[in-house]
Image (cartoon, rainbow, N blue to C red):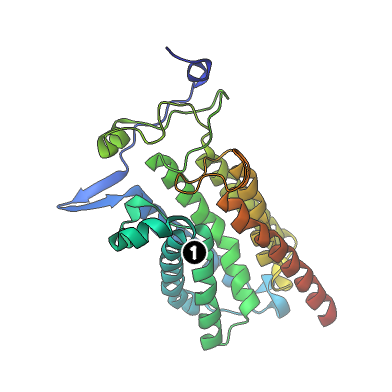
Amino acid sequence: MPTAANLLAIMPFPEIDPIAFSLGPLSIHWYGLAYVAGIMLGWYYARLIAGNDTLWPGNVSPITKVQLDDFIIWVALGIVLGGRIGYILFYDMPAVIESPIRAIQIWNGGMSFHGGLTGTTIAMIIFARRNAIPIWSLFDIVSAVVPIGLFCGRIANFVNGELWGRLTDVPWGMVFCNQYIEKTNGYCPGGDFVRHPSQLYEAGLEGIVLLLVLAVLIYGLRALKAPGFVTGVFVCGYALSRIFVEFFREPDAQLGYLVGTNWLTMGMVLSTPMVLLGIWAMLRARRQAALQH
């Protein structure tokens, strides 16, 4: 018998196959295409920013377009390797210890943003030192474009019917099941329950809103002239968005809530230090900019 929550679910979950297309035995998933799209669109936007000298200290860009073209390989490796290793360490270590082959089975658990951020940061530090690029300016340009990748990734999560939200009775709630998910798993992992489409909340906050805020700072307030400020806003903005959405997102099944029945999650734990780090980066950037004037 349908519940009130089921009756209120007026937004049907789309019938989209997680596999975009197949080439013989090779299946190309939307998830993988989302990563490619995020990296390529971010690279294009980064070239626009780097090519505008008036945005940078002294009206001189600290990085050339050729250097950005070389850097895309570094950042791609940082995202993929860091994201996967981070997921294993933060969310799936017991299962990987029991079955090591699971480490490369991305379909059994995805990527960690915090791991990807760590991997990308390491790649940026090494690349900046090898190419004599001011590290905070490289941090800024990458921070400016990361929301594009976050948006693409969260939309891919939605298409896959994964990382769904908590139970709800809001009119836009969804039952995260379609014929493709049921065929792949033999059942619907999210159950026949109406849930928050938390992937879309994250796509909106971490992706669209954060991208626009950073664009206003860069083009309207010339924030890149204070190296590190854009980075601080991004880190703090992402962390606050993630913590907020965690109140609507179902925690990973293997971890659950770390405190209580509906309280602390791993996403909150990993994001809280980022708020403090982001504030520190903004204050540092302002202080350094003031000293140079």
| Quarter where residue 106 is shown | bottom left
Taking the image as shown, residue 112 lies to the left or right of residue 160, namely right
Quarter placement of the C terminus: bottom right
What residue would you read off at disc 1?
116
Taking the image as shown, residue 25 lies to the left or right of residue 57, namely left
Instruction: Work out whether residue 61 can be spotted.
Output: no
Residue at image coords 72%, 69%:
281
Q: Position of residue 152 (x, y in %)?
A: 46, 50
Q: Is residue 286 above or below residue 109?
A: below
Q: Is residue 245 above or below residue 25?
A: above
Taking the image as shown, residue 22 lies to the left or right of residue 287, namely left
| Quarter where residue 137 is shown | bottom right
Q: Position of residue 56 (x, y in %)?
A: 68, 74
Residue at image coords 63%, 81%:
134
Q: Is residue 259 above or below residue 95?
A: above
Q: Nearer the viewer, residue 133 or 114?
A: 114
Q: Position of residue 90 (x, y in %)?
A: 49, 59
Instruction: Work out whether residue 157 can be spotted.
Output: yes
Q: Residue furthest left?
A: 24
Q: Nearer the viewer, residue 190 or 116?
A: 190
Q: How many marks?
A: 1
Q: Is residue 255 above or below residue 3?
A: below
| Amino acid found under the numbered disc labelled 1 | Gly
Q: Position of residue 193 (x, y in %)?
A: 45, 26
Q: Residue furthest top?
A: 1
Secondary structure type for disc 1 = helix
Mark 1 Cα shell of 10 Å, populated few (<14), some (14-19), many (≥20): many
